[in-house]
Image (cartoon, rainbow, N blue to C red):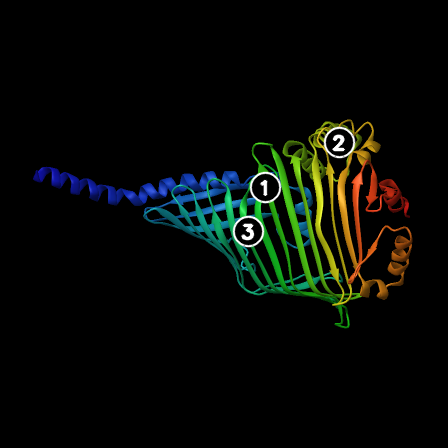
């Protein structure tokens, strides 16, 4: 019995002594696999040196920008296209902790702290200290960023969360103009599936302004945000997405606006066709005849399976009495085929509805709106309410059908916009 106890104790001691080495070995494999996964069409990642010790290790990783356009932009901004990252690792009981900094770039005070579990799940916090960059020349500028953080979690399954906090950014152009941002925050969670980001993201801005050479505001806004969500239907193999923009206290060259709200969504898009078309455009902004020819089967498939595009809300509020709001939805029904050979068949196939409101104050404030409303009233296409004017219409067989039964061909509304110089 005593021999068993001694053997167990000895085994435990041996395991304890070997465990840091085991953690280091497992951790190296996790890191090597992680670096390989970072490779894509724009950036090449590789481990230059891995010095594994007993309780700690050091790693040097090289990242090279391989995309010519991105590399050119880096050069214009005075940034190198190849970056070396030095990491100091500590072997914990069940994880690796790392502190990573940019090698040979002391002017860029960026530090990444990570804790990686042995299964590959990682918590991270990227910290930027006070940073100032000066670009000489007539088109140059001084960029100043206050201490900022980006933190979150990455799982081995590709799930990502992040929390961004940038208190302030100031860009002073050598020509005299200035850009000011404050209270920039962001949150998100989701994962990348092929070319799609699935999940939710929100970006908020406390204040933003653009000043001219005399330091007068050309543009300003406050308490504004953009949010995005997307999802994938595993059964139907379709993607859907929603985009919301909330802009408040806008100041532009045309005047002041209390708020602007946009809620746009699209959905039921065949994921394979949509992904191919998005990648084709991203990789070839100037499409050739061969590119267009290769896209035709995917366009056909996209329309034949159907999809929708909806403006759930578009609202502009100039003041308490001056408002505009519109909602509409267009649906391409399933079975809409041969659109590449005959694009004109798309309009008759569309279904949908339109709901628009103009406040009385807005109509009185802008004569050109008043003129249009008066003409629509004569044609009985618009209804007057206590607060303003309302339009309701259905889209059927290529026509907008109003409540009184009158119809206007959709092409008659689109054609003037297409032929404008």
Of marks 2 and 3, the one in the foreground: 3
Q: Residues within 10 Å of mark 3 (few under 14, many from 20)?
A: some
- Of tags 3 and 1, the one toward the viewer is 1
Quarter of the figure with the N terminus? top left
Q: Residue at x 20, y 44 (%)?
A: 13
* Residue at image mark 2: 291
Mark 3 and mark 1 lie on one chain; the one further toward the N terminus is 3
- Residue hosting label 3: 188
Helix, strand or loop at mark 2: helix
The mark found on residue 275 in the picture is none
On residue 231, the disc is 1
In front: 311, or 246?
Answer: 311
Specify which label sits upstream in the sequence, 2 or 3.
3
* Residue 198 pos. (x, y %): 57, 43
What residue appears at the point 73 percent right and 27 percent down from the top-left corner?
297
Mark 1 packing: few (<14 Cα in 10 Å), some, or many (20+)? Answer: some
> Distance between the Cα atoms at labels 2 and 3?
34 Å
- Measured along the vertical axis of the image, is residue 113 above or below residue 33? below
């Amino acid at each position: 019995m005593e021999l068993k106890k001694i053997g167990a104790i000895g085994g435990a001691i041996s395991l304890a002594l070997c465990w840091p080495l085991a953690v280091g070995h497992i951790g190296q494999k996790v890191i090597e696999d992680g670096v390989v996964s970072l490779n894509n069409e724009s950036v090449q990642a590789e481990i230059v040196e891995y010095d594994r010790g007993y309780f700690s290790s050091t790693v040097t990783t090289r990242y090279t920008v391989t995309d010519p356009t991105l590399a050119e932009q880096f050069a214009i901004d005075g940034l190198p296209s190849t970056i070396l990252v030095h990491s100091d690792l500590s072997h914990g009981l069940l994880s690796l902790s790392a502190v990573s900094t940019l090698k040979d770039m002391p002017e860029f005070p960026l530090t990444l702290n990570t804790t990686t579990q042995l299964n590959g799940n990682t918590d991270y916090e990227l910290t930027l200290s006070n940073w100032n960059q000066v670009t000489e020349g007539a088109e140059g500028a001084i960029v100043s960023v206050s201490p900022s953080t980006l933190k979150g979690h990455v799982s081995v399954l590709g799930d990502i969360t992040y929390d961004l906090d940038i208190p302030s950014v100031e860009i002073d152009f050598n020509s005299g103009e200035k850009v000011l941002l404050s209270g920039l925050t962001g949150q998100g969670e989701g994962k990348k599936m092929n070319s799609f980001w699935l999940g939710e993201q929100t970006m908020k801005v406390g204040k933003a302004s653009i000043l001219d050479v005399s330091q007068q505001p050309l543009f300003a806004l406050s308490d504004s945000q953009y949010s995005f969500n997307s999802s994938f239907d595993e059964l139907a193999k379709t993607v859907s997405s929603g985009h919301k923009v909330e802009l408040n206290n806008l100041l532009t060259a045309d005047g002041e606006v209390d708020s602007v709200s946009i809620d746009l969504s699209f959905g039921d898009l065949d994921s394979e066709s949509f992904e191919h078309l998005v990648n084709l455009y991203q990789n070839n902004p100037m499409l050739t005849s061969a590119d267009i020819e290769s896209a035709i089967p995917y366009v056909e498939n996209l329309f034949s399976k159907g999809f929708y595009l909806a403006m759930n809300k578009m609202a502009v509020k100039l003041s308490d009495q001056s408002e505009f709001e519109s909602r509409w939805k267009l649906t391409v029904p399933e079975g809409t085929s041969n659109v590449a050979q005959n694009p004109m068949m798309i309009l008759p196939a569309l279904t949908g509805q339109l709901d628009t409101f103009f406040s009385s104050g807005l109509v009185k404030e802008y004569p050109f709106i008043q003129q249009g409303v008066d003409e629509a009233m004569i044609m009985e296409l618009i209804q007057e309410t206590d607060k303003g004017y309302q339009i309701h219409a259905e889209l059927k067989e290529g026509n907008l059908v109003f409540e009184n039964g009158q119809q206007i061909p959709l092409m008659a509304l689109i054609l003037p916009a297409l032929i404008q110089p």
